[in-house]
Image: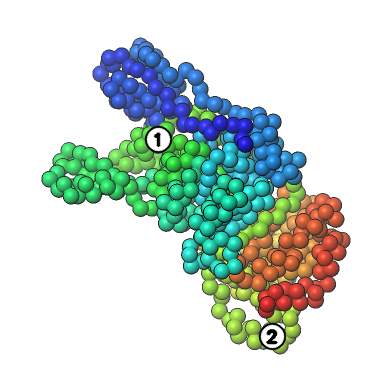
Amino acid sequence: MSRFAPPSYPHLTATMPPMPHGLAEAMEAIPGVRVKGPRVTASWHAVPILDGLLRGVGVTAADVAWLQPPQGDASWDEVRAALDGVAKPFVLDGFLTAYQREALAFTVNRAGAMLHHPTGSGKTVSAILWAAAQPHGATVIVTRAATRAQFAREVSRFTRYEAYALKPAAEVRKRDRWQGLADYVAWCRQDGQPPWIVVGWESIADHTNALLATGVTSLILDESHKGKSGKRWEVLPLAEDDAAAIASVKARGGFVKPSQDGEGIVGIMPRDNTVTAAATLSRAATRRLATTATPVSDRIRDLWGQLDLLEPGAWGSFSVWARRYCDARPGTYGGLDTSGISNPDELVARLAYLLHRVDHATTHAQLPAKRRESMYISGAEQCDAAPGFSREQKAAAGNGPAALLELKLAEAASKKRKAVLSRIADHVESGHKIVVFTGRRRDSDDLATSIRGACRKATVWCGHGGHSQNERDDIKRAYIAHEGGCVLVGTGEAWGTAIDGLQCTDAAFFVMLPYTPGQLTQWEGRFTRLGQDRPVCIYYCIAEGTVDEHVASILLDKIARVERVADGGSLDGASEALAGLDDPDAVIDSILAKLNG
């Protein structure tokens, strides 16, 4: 049982005396302040602004309930005690960094909080432990569809709970442990654990009612910038005598108000979109945590949607918020121009209550030299393989099992191009240097082209066997010298062995998986070697339903056994820990046996 009481959102109130003309309007111009007759309701971080306004005009509120602040930070000892028996023992025994422990102490008592930490800094484990420390009701995790399965696996890795990756019915396979959400919830009831459900941002609107039915208490909004949009309502002109239309608007959760021009009425209805679904979930939950490396990806206006998801209603409507903090003014072609910024110091002071920020220098000073992360890609997230594999398979079949396996791995790699693109873009946005190993030359070219389109400000190189050694040396020198976000794409064959200089890399993506201990040693050794000047995260990109799963099951899943033998996390000299699979032929035979079984 948690040592913390479920936090509630602090609505603070006061009773106002007769007010001077214009004071009510001035109070309502503060985001998070509502005036209803003599009663004023304010969010906690709006109180200092409201209090300053009242003092400035000499008005003293009565029956004040805003003198006591909401519950603040916990101590790490309190968090650790709450996680004891819930988190896996290794997590509490030196696994977490100082900033992760600080983040948990900061967020665990808050009804809404945001972790603004760089990509690759361990936000996932922090978010999971935040939810595990308050095991009341269901936890719903909203993330990208491509990372649903990965997030669910991380819950099992770090806690004693089993999570369910909610996916479309068309993707459910007979061998899946649970055939649907109802099946999983029934299992949780029988097992006595609270439900942990992972859903994609892309499909949240399709599952809102089912998620609400689980009794969601803790809501994790991973990559919260995907919920930045403030377009949650649509306006429908109405005739004042159209009773049926008015009733329809109200039945759909909307309301009716006079139109802005004062002529007639309009219906305001919730849009049927992702952010509306997220807002519905956030209002049902009692605890909300957002994680993002880029809360403001374009303009300061990007913040409002995320803040309203974390503290529903505490930041006012978007129009009020934009006038206060985006210098909103009439647009050239109608509407509001919200591209500016105003009152930045006031906004920063308010954000301090719910925002836990860690910079890149801090995270990288505390991260281990090498981390591995499996990135599972569902069938729905896979794209079509590049043409030509059917023809090549016939030729490979005559060249032995190794050739056939390599071709199947290259085909799987070809299907992962688009899915890994958003994760690469996140790292580039954080100013990281990225290396991507893929299967064939053509796939390297295609992926490099896609990255250039998605990361227009980043420098992207592509090098493989179709380039001369001199050309690849020039690419390597340029990559080493480059400062800031950049990407080097190439084949594992061209860059995975005997290359020195890539140890300046922040993240490496193995889009084509290595399948022997020797390859693992060589590929990872490009980044963890003498002269390494930063930690590196190595992503193993695994396409579900392909040969990748078989490679992972017999090789990648055994890495932990290797690390118990090899000091420092290196595979060098530890291939015997892979249950005799240091023989490449044995590995190939095992994979093909699984594949053909």
Residue 244: x and y in percent read: 18, 50
| Res. 313 mark | 1
Characterize the local packing of mark 1: few (<14), some (14-19) or many (20 or more) Cα atoms within 10 angstroms.
some
- At a point 58% along the width and 40% down the height, the residue shown is 135
Which quarter of the rendered picture does the N terminus lie within? top right
Looking at the picture, tell me which residue is in the foreground, 33 or 244.
244
Q: How many numbered callouts? A: 2
Is there CB contact under 8 Å for labels 1 and 2? no
Residue 446: x and y in percent read: 57, 69
Which quarter of the rendered picture does the C terminus lie within? bottom right
Establish if 320 lies above or below 18. Answer: below
Residue 561: x and y in percent read: 80, 57
Residue 281: x and y in percent read: 44, 45
Characterize the local packing of mark 2: few (<14), some (14-19) or many (20 or more) Cα atoms within 10 angstroms.
some
Mark 1: which amino acid? Gly
Q: Point out the residue furthest to the left here.
A: 241
State the SS at label 2: helix
Q: Which residue is mark 2?
A: 397
Report, in whole angstroms, how far the alpha carbon at label 1 lies from the one at label 2. 62 Å
- At a point 48% along the width and 53% down the height, the residue shown is 201
Looking at the picture, tell me which residue is in the foreground, 249 or 344.
249
Q: Point out the residue furthest to the front here.
A: 190
Looking at the picture, tell me which residue is in the foreground, 177 or 592.
177
Mark 2: which amino acid? Ala
- At a point 63% along the width and 55% down the height, the residue shown is 153
Specify the quadrant of the image occupied by residue 98. Answer: top right
- At a point 36% along the width and 37% down the height, the residue shown is 317
State the SS at label 1: loop
Mark before the other along the chain sequence, 1 or 2: 1
